[in-house]
Amino acid sequence: MTGRIWLIAGPTASGKSALALSLAEAVGGEIVNADSMQLYAGLRVLTAGPPPEERSQAPHHLFGAVDPADGWSVGRWLRAATEIIADIRARGRDAVVVGGTGLYFRALTHGLAEIPAVAADVRRAAGVEFEALGEEAFRARLAKADPAAAARIAPGDRQRLARAWEVYVATGTSLSDHQARAEGALPAGSWTGVAIDPPRAALYARCDARLVGMVELGALDEVRALMARNLDPDLPAMKAVGMRELAAHLRGETTLEAALAAAQQETRRYAKRQTTWMRGQMAEWPRLTGLDPRDHWRQFLALNPALTA
């Protein structure tokens, strides 16, 4: 028997982990992480990874599994996740993939194009040109080389705009053309996706409250331990939301109150970017509203009545 694949996406603090756990317990499934920061060891509190009591309720995969010194790409995560999902299904169990990293879900459902590596000098040049031109002019130039990318990339998403341009410069082929040749990693019809899309004001309030709780639960200790390793600041783990702000406090550059306020603001911005991605890239996925886990579960069951049969 081959198990089913459930995909649960949502912005930070939206309640997706609670829904994933409820589903895994209901179907006897196993949870697979699709959050680029929860991958890394030593950052469970700061990245809101599942605590031990939740991990004991269902098998969890790819949470805290990677040393922060080892920066994973989307492709590396995709290879690991597809292997784990295949193993779960081969054992007749359901795989519940949950997270907030839109590119992970995109790679899992649409495949990942094999794009040649872009030289560091090309990447730097793209960043310099973005700063010199500004977003509007940079996007207009990109539209001549890759109109599809220029149209779909959300306003303010400098990273993806620069990425699309640097791929074109480095390869002579647009990023959209590369992606069009990608094959989906999951078989058609094998997965069911849902996205949590709560009211923005309520989500922001929860983000703010959760940051306070993270500090109380030991986020500063996690940041301090990672700082002591003197890792390359460009590593993904060093860019976890809240890391930069709390590190500034630990270096004596700002008060804890100011650092917390800055981290809260950055978390709200991150949640907004995640929501924008979902609305653009997962527009066809059914939506769950609100923030109450019980409401999420009721809405999820209404979308999947076979679970109650």
Image (cartoon, rainbow, N blue to C red):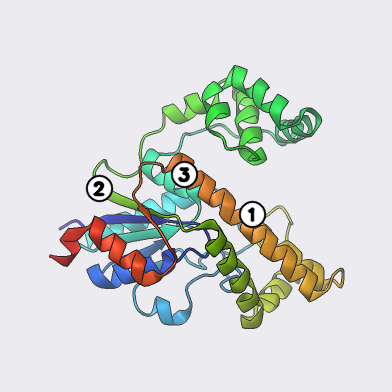
Question: Mark number for residue 190?
Answer: 2
Dot 1: element: helix
The mark found on residue 269 in the picture is 1
Cα distance between the residues tagged 1 and 3: 15 Å
Disc 3 residue type (three-letter): Arg
**Which residue occupies 62% across, 63% down?**
68
Q: Is residue 189 left or right of residue 289?
A: left
Residue density around tag 1, few if under 14, some if 14–19, many if 20 or more, within 10 Å? some
Judge the density around disc 2: few (<14), some (14-19), many (≥20) Cα neighbours within 10 Å. few
Residue at (36, 41) in percent of width and height: 284
Q: Where on the picture, by quarter, is residue 212?
A: bottom right
The span from disc 3 to disc 2 (Cα, nearest Å) is: 22 Å
- Relative horizontal placement of residue 45, taking residue 284 as reference (left or right): right
Point 25% across, 62% down: residue: 301
Q: Return the mark for residue 279.
A: 3
In this rendering, does residue 75 appear at all? no
Q: Residue furthest left?
A: 309
- Give the mark, 3 or 2, whose residue is nearer the N terminus: 2
Q: Position of residue 296 (x, y in %)?
A: 35, 65
Q: Earlier in the sequence, mark 1 or mark 3?
A: 1
Kind of residue sitting beneath label 2: Ser
Screen quadrant of the C terminus: bottom left
Mark in front: 3 vs 2? 3
Q: Is residue 254 above or below residue 123?
A: below
Per the image, label 3 sits on a secondary structure element best described as helix
